[in-house]
Amino acid sequence: MSGRLRLYVVLAALRVACSVFLLGMVHPDEFFQSQEVMARHFLPEAEDALRRQLHVPWEFQLPSPNRSIIFPALVAGLPYKILQLLGVKRTGWLLLVAPRVLLCLLSFTLDAVIFAVVGHLSRGQKLEIRREKQEKALLLLASSWPTLVLLCRPFSNTCETLVLALCFAVLFLVNPHRRVLCGVMHVQTVLLGSLLAVGFFTRFTFPVFFFPLGVELVRQQDALLVHAARKKETVGPSVVRRLAATLAVAVQGLVAFLIWSVGFIVVDTVYFHPEVVEGGWNRSMLQKIAGNAVIAPLNNLLYNVQYDNLELHGVHPRLTHLTVNMPMLFGPMFLVFLVRFLRYPDRSFFGGACVMFPLACLSLAPHQEPRFLLPTIVPLHIFTALHGRTGVVRFLTTYKLGLLLWIGFNVVLTLFFGILHQGGVVPMLLSLSTIASLMLARRDSCLRRPTCLPASYSLG
C-alpha cells in the first residue's frame, strides 16, 4: 500500500469519527429534514406527550407538502427501524447518530465513484500517472471539510450529492452500447432517467446539476452513431437520423423518469393523505390518489419562485454563491478550478459546465446557502484531479505552501462547523433527554437563549 493510500485510510477513519463525535449544528435543517420528521413514527404510545411536542417542519405540512417523505424515510426511518427490530433501547444519542453513521458509510460511494471516473477519464495515460491522479483525488476529497462534516449530516443536499455521484458513474462507467429488452431500451439512458427522478424528488434543484450530464449523454450517443455509420458507409448518418436517435434517447430517459416519479407521487400521497387507502386497493382508491396527488418538488418550486416566501428565510446578493459560498466550501480548490476554467475553457468545457452551470442557475435565486452547492463537490474533485500534474493545480498537492493552505483551511472550518457553530445546542438536548420523562410528567418548562430552533426528537 502506497503512502497516499495509508493516509487515505487514516482520513476515512477520521470521517467515521467525525460523524459520531462532532456535535456542532451546521443548520437546523439537518434535523428538520429527516430525524424530526421520522422520530414520531417510532415513539411508543406511552410517550404520546413527547410525540405531540415534536415539531412538524413546514415543508411536511398540508395542504401543500414541499418535501417528499422518501428522503427522511431512507435516511432516518430506515436506521430507526433497524434499531427497533434489534430491540436496542432508544436514546437521544442513538437517534442523533444512527442517520449520521448511515450517511457516513454511504459517503464512501463518492470516493469509489471519483476514483473510478478519474481512472476512466485518464485511461490513455501511463499506469503510474493514472494511479497518482486517482490517489490525489481520494486524498483531496477525504481531507475536505464538506466531506468530514456536511456529507455525514442528514441534509437533503447530502442525498442529492450521492445521487449525482451515481449519475457520473452511470455516464462514464456503464457500457454505452448495452441495451436490454430485445435491444430496445438503452441501459445508460434508463438508469440516468431513473436517477433524475430520485434526485428531483430529493431536491427540486437537482435537474440543474444533472443537465450537463444529460447533454453529455446525448453527445456521446451521437458520436457513437456517427462512428458506427462511418465504419459501414463512406458518409456519416443524415441529420434526420441523428435527430431521431437524439429523440429516442430523450424519450427513453423521460419514460424512466415518469415511471419513478409516479411511484414517488403515490408514496407521498398515501403518506400525507392516509385516508385515500381506506377501504383497500380498488378503483376508487386510485381515483382518490389522483385527486389528492402530492407532487412535493413542484410545490417546493412554486414556493421558492415567490420572493415574499424567500424573504422569510433570508435573501442575499446574487453573487453570494460565487464570491462567498463556493470559496467557503472548497477554498483553494475552487480558486484552482476557476483559474483553469478561465484560462483553458476549451480543454475542460464539460468539467467547467458541471460546476459553473448549476452555480449560475442557483445564483439566480435570492436565497443562497453554501450547502445548496454541495453536489458540485463531485465534478470539482474529478476534473481538478485530472489536471493534478500541471500548472496551478499541482500547487495544492505537491508544494508545501499549497499543502499548508489546504490543510489549514479544512482544519479551521471542520472545527468551526463541526464543533463550535451552535455547539451547545445538541449537547444540551442530549443532556435533557435523560430527564425528559420527568419534565413531561411535571409539566415543567425549559427556557433557552436565542439559538437556532432546537430539535425535540433527541429528547426521546
Image (cartoon, grey):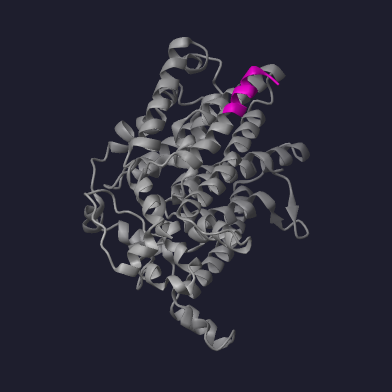
**Residue at far top of view:** 400
Which residue is at the front of the view, 426 or 378?
426
Question: Can residue 236 be spotted in the picture?
Answer: no
Which residue is at the front of the view, 332 or 236?
332
Stretch in magenta: 1-10
Which residue is at the front of the view, 432 or 392?
432
The percent coordinates of residue 302 (x first, y second) are 33, 62
Query: Is 159 inside the magenta-drawn segment?
Result: no
Residue occupying image coordinates x 47% and y 63%: 38
The percent coordinates of residue 248 (x first, y second) are 62, 55
Quadrant hosting residue 329: top left
The percent coordinates of residue 109 (x first, y second) are 60, 41
Which quarter shows the N terminus? top right
Query: Against 193, is 384 above or below?
Result: above
Quadrant hosting residue 33: bottom left
Which residue is at the front of the view, 366 or 314?
314
Number of disc labels: 0
- In the displayed structure image, the side of residue 131 where residue 75 appears, left or right: left
Question: Can residue 198 be spotted in the picture?
Answer: yes
Residue occupying image coordinates x 67% and y 22%: 131
